[in-house]
Amino acid sequence: MGIQEGIKVVHVSITRLGVSSFSLQDETITLEIGFNDGTQKQVYRTTRLEETDELASKILEDIVKMEENINMEFDGEQLTGTVHVIMERYDEVYNSLVNFLKDVHCKLCKIKNAKISDGYIDMVRALQHTGLRFYG
């Protein structure tokens, strides 16, 4: 009979979101997502902007799963213990992420549908500099 391991609790907070790159041809964007679990980390995610609500949930779920995998313990034969990841300010982050993705989608559509070159570079720069920071 094995020794029951304790539950490891990991607190994760999203610190920033930004557009790293985008493709008008593929209608994709690459997001830079900064988060903190005791140390500052960042991941990149390339995605299509379709259902922003579902995408926001999926992004947050993926970060939680990644943290579970990072913090899982291995005793040489099997995974041991349990990891419980707590996303700080989940509702606030989720709502801000949905609005951020809608804003990015709107800017991407404006660029894609631009009929004249006047202001095109400014629209591209506006999209490239779209970001969101979380404090506290």
Image: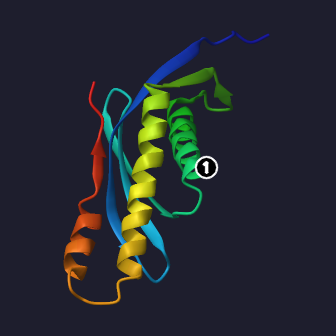
The residue that label 1 is drawn on is: 54
Residue found at x 54% / y 36%: 64
Amino acid carrying label 1: it is: Glu
Q: Quadrant of the N terminus?
A: top right
Tell me: residue 19, above or below residue 60. below
Q: In this orientation, does residue 14 appear?
A: yes
In this picture, residue 48 sits left or right of residue 106:
right
Q: Give the SS element for disc 1.
A: helix
| Residue at x 52%, y 63% (from the top left corner) | 49
Horizontal relation, residue 57 to residue 40: left or right: right
Percent of width and height locating residue 58: 58, 47
Image coordinates of residue 27 in percent, x first then y, are 48, 75
Indicate the quadrant where residue 128 lies.
bottom left
Q: Nearer the viewer, residue 118 or 19?
A: 118
Residue 30 visible in the displayed image: no
Q: Is residue 60 above or below residue 109?
A: above
